Amino acid sequence: MSSSTVELTKENFDQTVMDNDFVLIDFWASWCGPCRQFAPVYEKAAEDNPDLVFGKVDTEAQPELAAAFGIQSIPTLMIVRDRVAVFAQPGALPEAALTDVIGQARGLDMDEVRKAVEAQQSKAEQNGE
């Protein structure tokens, strides 16, 4: 892990997400071949985007975090903006795709996202979910 990424644990996860309005999270494990292939792509993106926080969650060391986010396969990339998960996708993204996803997440209107989340939550409550 380089200095451009942060190891996220159950001890520092909430604080990291609360203190930063844009956090990328790579759920990975040392035994996972695709995770090892994705690691240098993720590190380069972290170096190319020093204004963003790039976190890594070792699913073997942090099974509670993986379970809390329903991680079924690794690697899984998640992006959290203003404490809202705006992207989650399993699989090792190629560099161009990761750059594109970061650009799309940067361009989101978070007021619109929050309205959509609130609408979904109230609809779920009305349906007794």
Image (tube, rainbow, N blue to C red):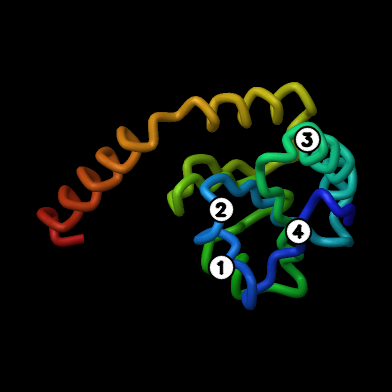
User: The disc labelled 2 sits on which kind of residue?
Assistant: Asn
Identity of the residue drawn at 53% across and 32% down:
105
Mark 2: give few (<14), some (14-19) or many (20+) Cα within 10 Å: some
CB contact under 8 Å: marks 1 and 3: no
**Circle on res. 45:** 3
Mark-to-mark CA distance, 3 and 2: 17 Å
Mark 4: give few (<14), some (14-19) or many (20+) Cα within 10 Å: some
Foreground pick, 41 / 109: 109
Residue placed under numbered mark 1 in the picture: 15
Mark 1: give few (<14), some (14-19) or many (20+) Cα within 10 Å: few
Query: N-terminal of the two: label 3 or label 2?
Result: 2
Query: N-terminal of the two: label 4 or label 3?
Result: 4
Identity of the residue drawn at 24% across and 45% down:
120
User: Residue 29's x, y, as percent?
Assistant: 81, 61
Q: Is residue 33 left or right of residue 115?
A: right
User: The disc labelled 3 sits on which kind of residue?
Assistant: Ala
Q: Judging from the image, what secondary structure is the residue with disc 3 in?
A: helix
CB contact under 8 Å: marks 1 and 4: no
> In the picture shown, does residue 33 fall above or below 15?
above
Give the position of the C terminus as an image quadrant: bottom left
Q: Judging from the image, what secondary structure is the residue with disc 4 in?
A: strand
User: The disc labelled 4 sits on which kind of residue?
Assistant: Val
Mark-to-mark CA distance, 1 and 4: 12 Å
Query: N-terminal of the two: label 1 or label 3?
Result: 1
Query: N-terminal of the two: label 1 or label 2?
Result: 1
Mark-to-mark CA distance, 1 and 3: 22 Å
Residue placed under numbered mark 4 in the picture: 6
Residue placed under numbered mark 2 in the picture: 20
